[in-house]
Image (cartoon, grey):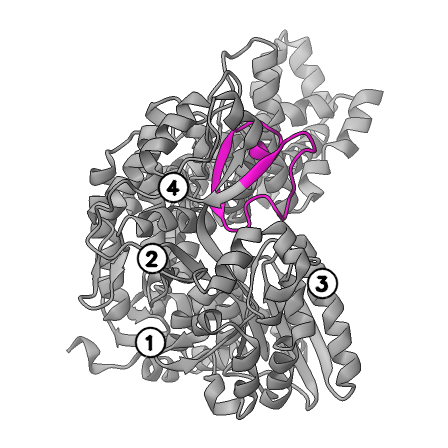
């Protein structure tokens, strides 16, 4: 018995080491850096909150917070909602949906850089195919600069984000919907439930665990996303699309201000953990019970 | 009291963090005879030529195992910084002259005076002195330049110019406003300029502002000077051109970086565009578009607080030896190879016409004279570099240029007046500079 326990610990040791080395270690390092005044690689004092106070005094930081909220909350909600709609459609058996289930992964497998460059070109007001099509079909009077207009840029980025992230969400939810027992749906039908009611009261409760998991994962993916916004806009115009990940990059590699960048990373982590915890708490009954089953 | 405990010591007290730190900063060991080179940026032609000449280096130095990598110029800072921190920096870095002060500040690169010995005498003979000067910092040579780019220049569509009744390109800011308006017709603005936050777009604007006596930073006082009249008025010129209806929509300018602007001009969709000395040469223009390149028009009267310059220049392929190099002898051999006329002539009009060559011998090439007769004439007369200054280069330059980029966009979009935008940018950049400089 004792030997079995030792063997078990031994077997999980590589994972423990990996987690310590690649998750806990860097996180701890960033946390200590956030309490260190460190610029241009030179340490100028540990045990200070000056990085956090610098951030709160920076007007761009509050714009970054607002943009990040649109990016994470808008991106996650729309990604999951669109993914749920597409997943529901794909769950229907037909030749078309069979083909689409394979094709829909295409945006997911494309590299970030390729996606960003292609969308940047398509959305460009002067040379982009989307603006030119809108103009030539008479839908707009002139071309629209989706990425150059401060009022449009964040939402244009969110659309691209959804295009990129939604397919996997849709496939996961499609698989969950297809695993809902037929007899439950049939029983609801016989009781006179409309399609909408069957979806709301039979399918949704059955896929609650998958829905919660995919929402949390999407939120984490979207928070960590850097390449898309950075390549497409560089945070512009006039910081209108500056989000946490791009501003952290700018502070680190353009201004060499690692202390402030680390402080932002800590805020980002706390913010994300809080949102995820709140979300899991609100949905605790539906997903926890199904998970335990 | 805040400084009573050192962060490194604090980390050392925790065994786990200590182990992680050791694991993440583990050293990389280069083998004897290996030479790694990272090159950042360049025109397509130049990138191809560079790789080809590397083969010649390997043939001439069979004992040196050359490991060459090419990267996009925009990622150079994080790549080099990350390499330095993880002790995996290449032996030779081919980056931009604007980077030198910060790389020196970090201790990332070595002074060549200390390791190149008498090779430097040969470099001085083969390289134009004004260009070699661009590799200097604090009186020491840190980089071997192969060419320079100058700001700012204007590309002009000759058909559009003649259609509008002009027989020469504009020479002053007032003329530029008039020309741009007169050359505008439906679907073809008179002038386009890039206004993204890309460093090159900012360099293009700096060329105009410096010619108006503006500076972004005063090294003597340590003050950010983005709201100097020289810069405010240069930004007002951008705003005036937009207000006159001579440009594409303002929202289009803020998403159009230099290469897109060159493309618009090359397709005949803009009558003029503002760029660096290379203008359209790396990307070409449609065959039916006749064009010429001229220095950007001068202000009617310089309004800045500093002496106006004729141009600003920077070597964007300058070879530096990293402080982490395990093989400085081979690194110097590589630099010396690139200081030879055979290599420097790449930029002598054949095959590359987009740069201002560093090699003295390259200026004798007939191909260069055929493409840029005015450059060669000015070089031979000794006036090409007259009144030219380096592009902004000091510790913290990125922070100020970033603030300037934001201010340009705010003014272009009409969110703020040039004065308001640059006042705010000055304040924001000064905070960063004070932090960086301690």
**Which comes sooner in the sequence, label 4 or label 2?**
4
Q: Earlier in the sequence, mark 3 or mark 4?
A: 3
Which secondary structure lies at badge 2?
helix
Q: Position of residue B102 (x, y in %)?
A: 39, 70
Residue tagged by mark 2? B399
B146 w.r.t. B418: above or below: below
Q: Are marks 2 and 1 on the same chain?
A: no
Q: Nearer the viewer, residue B323 or A241?
A: B323
The chain to which mark 4 is attached is: B
Q: Which residues are magenta?
A: B264-292
Secondary structure under badge 3? helix
* Relative to B80, residue A202 above or below: above
Viewport quadrant of the C terminus of chain B: bottom left
Q: Looking at the image, can residue A237 be seen?
A: yes
For the residue pair A200 and A182, the one nearer the viewer reads as: A200
Q: Which residue is mark 3?
A: B49
**What is the CA distance from the residue labelled 1 to the residue labelled 4?**
43 Å
């Amino acid at each position: 018995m004792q030997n079995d326990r030792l063997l078990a610990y031994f077997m999980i040791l590589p994972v423990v080491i990996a987690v310590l080395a690649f998750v806990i270690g860097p996180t701890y390092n960033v946390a200590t850096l956030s309490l260190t005044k460190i610029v241009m690689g030179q340490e100028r004092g540990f045990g200070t909150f000056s990085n956090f106070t610098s951030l709160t005094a920076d007007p761009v930081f509050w714009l970054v917070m607002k943009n990040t909220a649109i990016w994470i909350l808008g991106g996650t909600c729309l990604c999951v909602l669109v993914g749920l709609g597409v997943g529901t459609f794909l769950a229907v058996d037909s030749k078309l949906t069979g083909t689409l289930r394979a094709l829909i992964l295409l945006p997911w497998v494309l590299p970030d850089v390729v996606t960003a460059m292609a969308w940047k070109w398509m959305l460009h007001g002067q040379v982009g195919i989307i603006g030119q099509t809108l103009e030539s079909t008479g839908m707009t009077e002139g071309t629209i600069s989706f990425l150059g207009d401060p009022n449009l840029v964040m939402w244009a980025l969110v659309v691209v984000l959804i295009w990129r992230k939604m397919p996997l969400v849709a496939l996961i939810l499609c698989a969950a919907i297809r695993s809902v027992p037929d007899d439950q749906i049939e029983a609801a039908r016989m009781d006179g439930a409309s399609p909408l009611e069957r979806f709301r009261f039979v399918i949704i409760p059955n896929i609650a665990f998958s829905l919660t998991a995919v929402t949390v994962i999407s939120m984490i993916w979207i928070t960590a996303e850097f390449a898309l916004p950075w390549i497409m806009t560089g945070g512009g115009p006039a910081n209108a699309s500056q989000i946490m990940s791009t501003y952290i990059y700018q502070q680190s590699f353009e201004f060499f201000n690692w202390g402030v960048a680390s402080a932002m990373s800590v805020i980002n982590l706390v913010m994300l953990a809080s949102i995820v915890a709140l979300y899991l708490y609100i949905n605790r009954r539906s997903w926890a019970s199904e998970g335990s089953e | 009291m805040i400084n009573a405990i050192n962060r490194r010591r604090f980390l050392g007290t925790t065994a786990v963090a200590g182990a992680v730190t050791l694991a993440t900063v583990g050293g990389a060991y280069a083998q004897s005879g290996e030479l790694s080179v990272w090159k950042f940026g360049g025109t397509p032609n130049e990138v191809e030529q560079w790789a080809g000449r590397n083969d010649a280096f390997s043939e001439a130095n069979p004992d040196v195992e050359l490991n060459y990598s090419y990267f996009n110029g925009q990622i150079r800072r994080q790549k080099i910084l990350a390499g330095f921190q993880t002790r995996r920096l290449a032996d030779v870095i081919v980056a931009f002259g604007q980077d030198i002060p910060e790389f020196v500040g970090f201790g990332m690169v070595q002074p060549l005076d200390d390791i190149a010995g008498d090779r430097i005498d040969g470099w001085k003979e083969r390289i134009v002195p004004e260009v070699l000067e661009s590799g200097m910092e604090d009186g020491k040579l840190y980089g071997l330049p192969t060419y320079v780019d100058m700001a700012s220049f204007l590309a002009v569509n000759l058909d559009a110019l003649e259609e509008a009744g002009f027989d020469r390109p504009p020479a002053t800011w007032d003329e530029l406003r008039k020309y741009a308006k007169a050359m505008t017709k439906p679907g073809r603005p008179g002038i386009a300029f890039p206004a993204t936050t890309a460093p090159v777009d900012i360099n293009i604007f700096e060329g105009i502002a410096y010619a108006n006596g503006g500076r972004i930073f005063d090294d003597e006082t340590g003050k950010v000077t983005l709201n100097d009249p020289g810069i405010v008025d240069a930004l007002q010129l951008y705003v005036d051109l937009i207000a006159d209806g001579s440009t594409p929509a303002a929202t289009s300018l803020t998403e159009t970086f230099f290469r897109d602007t060159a493309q618009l001009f090359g397709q005949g969709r803009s009558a003029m565009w503002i760029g660096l000395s290379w203008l359209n040469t790396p990307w070409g223009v449609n065959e039916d578009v006749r064009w010429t390149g001229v220095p950007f028009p001068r202000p009617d009267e310089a309004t800045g607080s500093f002496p106006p310059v004729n141009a600003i220049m920077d070597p964007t392929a300058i070879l530096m030896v990293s402080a982490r190099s395990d093989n400085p002898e081979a690194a110097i051999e590589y630099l010396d190879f690139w200081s030879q006329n055979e290599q420097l002539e790449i930029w002598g009009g054949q095959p590359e016409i987009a740069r201002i060559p560093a090699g003295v011998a390259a200026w004798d090439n007939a191909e260069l004279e055929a493409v840029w007769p005015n450059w060669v004439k000015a070089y031979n007369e000794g006036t090409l570099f007259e009144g030219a200054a380096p592009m902004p280069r000091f510790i913290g330059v990125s922070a100020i240029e970033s603030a300037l980029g934001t201010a340009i966009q705010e003014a272009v979009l009409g969110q703020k007046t040039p004065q308001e935008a640059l006042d705010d940018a000055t304040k924001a950049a000064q905070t960063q500079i004070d932090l960086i400089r301690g």
